Image (cartoon, coloured by chain):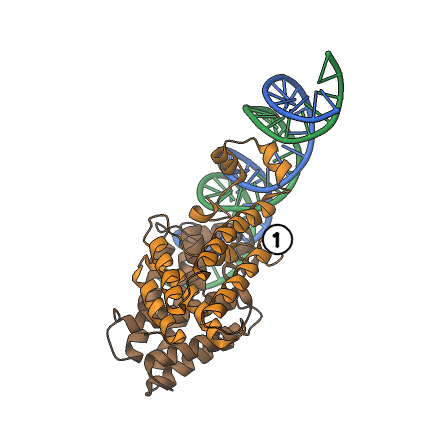
Chain colours: A orange, B brown, C blue, D green
Amino acid sequence: MFYRDGINVTGIDRVIAGAGVAKASLYNNFSGKDELIAAYLEASLERFVDLLDELAEVAEPGERLARFFAELARSASDAAFSGCPFANAAVEVTPESPAHEVIVRFYERLAQFFAHVVETTPDDPAVKQLIVCYDGAMSAAKVLRDPSLITAAEALARRIVAVP
Amino acid sequence: MFYRDGINVTGIDRVIAGAGVAKASLYNNFSGKDELIAAYLEASLERFVDLLDELAEVAEPGERLARFFAELARSASDAAFSGCPFANAAVEVTPESPAHEVIVRFYERLAQFFAHVVETTPDDPAVKQLIVCYDGAMSAAKVLRDPSLITAAEALARRIVAVP
DNA sequence: GCCTAACTATACAGGTCTGTCTAGTATGAT
DNA sequence: ATCATACTAGACAGACCTGTATAGTTAGGC
């Protein structure tokens, strides 16, 4: 719900109804909505890290990048696609929220993956360019509902990695 | 307020207090919050279009792109920077909202500008890549509060336009 | 001077929000 | 068997939300 409808418009009552759980149970496990949001992002990050770990086993950098963007394209063509959950959340939460730390961690992990692809350090400009490719692809594809933006971003990323 | 704090967390009462205006006056000029949001984006779009029109007078494509990204970098280093108002709004409003049409119009106008830069049509893959550069730069710079992502995106854009 | 139109302030309705509290129930360990 | 723990349903408080209504005030056109 947080991903599909947005964080602020999704009330606690709808969350517990969807989960089939009593309100007190939720507040026994989470201190409040802020912590619930952070947990939602934590779970999303975990799945994302799993994907990156899988891709890390692919030897060839160009192939690694191709599979990464293929996965993005796959999710972008899904009807439930709504952009990057972390970039979306960043619009709705304050920097003081516990969710923000998870968002930053996501970007660090993404930078680490890209750094591995181009065999450099995470603060390399090439890594920043690849992050721009990712973020731009997800953001634009969300609004315009056009998966071809993902392939455009991939072509761009290939140039950075210097793989034809 | 919509830009700085977000659309959903900014209530009507705070808007009218900030504007120094009575509530009835607001509802005499706007049918509701949805229309107010659309008007806010419309005003943002107008300023953005003014910038693009200025840049259109610059003859050389590379210089046009440079000035465009220089303007982005300038706004990104502002303390009040909070990413692209249109991409942000897209996270908070539904596709049925009147605001959504303004957002789409923004992207069309942006594509038109980029098409003019590379002297091609708006549906050219190169234009999509430039949109990815813009969106990625704004989104990543917002979360990470790192203006150097704008320059990274600019370097990327320069490769698309094939200007060194 | 008067009338219209748009403003002002403020109260209110009806709804939703987060979070707390009460009260009863199930489960599992000792 | 007892007792702690975690669950259930649901009422409730207090705040905030959007939008409407009331009543008085100001300003411009004629």
Tell how many labels. Answer: 1
- Location of residue D1 with respect to A81 vertically, above or below: above
- Location of residue B14 with respect to D11 vertically, above or below: below
Rendering quarter of residue B65? bottom left
Around disc 1, counting alpha carbons within 10 Å, would you say few (fewer than 14), some (14 to 19), or many (20 or more)?
A: some
Left/right of residue C10 with respect to residue B63 in the rendered view: right
- Location of residue C27 with respect to C6 vertically, above or below: above
Helix, strand, or loop for circle 1?
Answer: helix
Rendered location of residue A101, percent (x, y): 60, 57
Rendered location of residue D26, percent (x, y): 53, 59
Give amino acid for label 1.
Pro
Foreground residue among B160 and A161: A161
Quarter containing the C terminus of chain B: bottom left
Rendered location of residue B154, percent (x, y): 43, 78
Residue B46 appears in the figure = no
- Location of residue B150 with respect to A64 vertically, above or below: below
Q: Label 1 marks which chain's residue?
A: A
Q: Image point 35% across, 51% down: which residue?
A: B95
Q: Image point 51% across, 41% down: which residue?
A: A11
Q: Image point 34% across, 65% down: which residue?
A: B107
Q: Residue furthest left?
A: B121
Rendered location of residue A31, percent (x, y): 64, 42
Q: Which residue is mark 1?
A: A98
Left/right of residue B73 with respect to residue B115 in the rendered view: right
Residue A118 appears in the figure = yes
Foreground residue among B59 and A164: A164
